[in-house]
Amino acid sequence: MHNNMSSILDKIRKELKANVDLKYKEGFKNFFKKNEKINLIGTRSPIVKKISSKYYKKIAYKNKLEIFNLCEKLLEKKTCEETSIAFNWAHRQNKNLTKKDFFIFEKWLKKYVNNWAFCDDFCTHAFGELIFKYPQCLPRVKTWAKSKNRWLRRASAVILIYSVRQEKYLKNILKTADILLQDSDDLVQKGYGWSLKVASNTFPKEVLEFIMKRKNKMPRTALRYAIEKYPKEMKSKAMK
């Protein structure tokens, strides 16, 4: 069994390396800050998705914990492509997720997420769906907003995007945005601003009311993200 798993990981890595696009690899770095740790093989996303799907079919018969073990082996390399595959495989287990899986996912978040792309991919898919299914975990998520780890703080807002798209947990988004309101990290500001923007699609009145009461305290970065979907005149009022 162990040899079979190692063989699958080896094949994935060989395919990723065989599909490197150097021009794409160079351009990709521009989406990140210099202090963000980006470990990119250089394989374009559509190809990564095909590889992910191809090899998931070969492991789909395994139980959830075996699959999570494989995910962790991919995450340990901290490459963008292998991390993407790991989070995709975790999301494919969505029907099998239990409340206990929260602690596995939280460990991954703390240990392997070191840039905004990893944070957003994981939190808006696999981890976001788990939170939607198990709202008992929401108090724990709220504690991340006060973490020293910038990615946990961003995650505390971004993880609620999945739920608010299903018209749930608006109150949690607003409470989290309040905690993060004057966070000095612009990537955290963008994270909670994005969560407010998505919430505004379904709850435009409530979100606008929240923003207007706090617009003088909100950093401009967060404010611009939050009001993006509103009509021009409302944007102008908010930015005054």
Image (cartoon, helix red, strand yellow):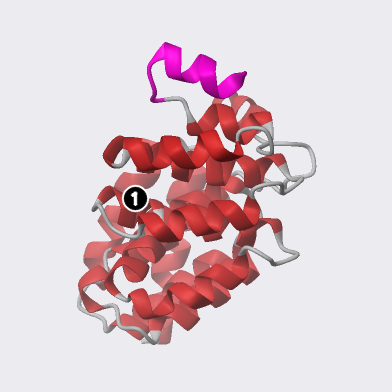
Which of the two residues, 170 or 114, is positioned nearer the viewer here? Answer: 170
Estimate the x, y position of residue 168 in percent, counting from the top left.
28, 58
Q: Is residue 230 magenta?
A: yes
Residue at x 78% of width, y 37% of height: 34
User: Residue 235: in sight, yes or no?
Assistant: yes
Q: Please identify the quadrant where the C terminus is shown.
A: top right
Q: Is residue 60 above or below residue 186?
A: below
Instruction: State the SS at label 1.
Output: helix
Residue at x 54% of width, y 69% of height: 142
Q: Is residue 188 magenta?
A: no
Identify residue for label 1.
51
Estimate the x, y position of residue 51 in percent, counting from the top left.
34, 50
Residue at x 27% of width, y 72% of height: 133
- In this image, 78 relative to 68: left or right? right
Which of the two residues, 91 or 156, is positioned nearer the viewer here? Answer: 156
Report the magenta stretch's main SS.
helix
Estimate the x, y position of residue 224 in percent, counting from the top left.
56, 26
Q: Is residue 82 above or below residue 33?
A: below
Q: Amino acid at mark 1?
A: Ile
Q: What segment is highlighted magenta in the picture?
A: 229-240
Which of the two residues, 64 or 211, is positioned nearer the viewer here? Answer: 211
Mark 1: few/some/many CA within 10 Å (<14, 14-19, 20+): some
Q: Please identify the quadrant where the N terminus is shown.
A: bottom left
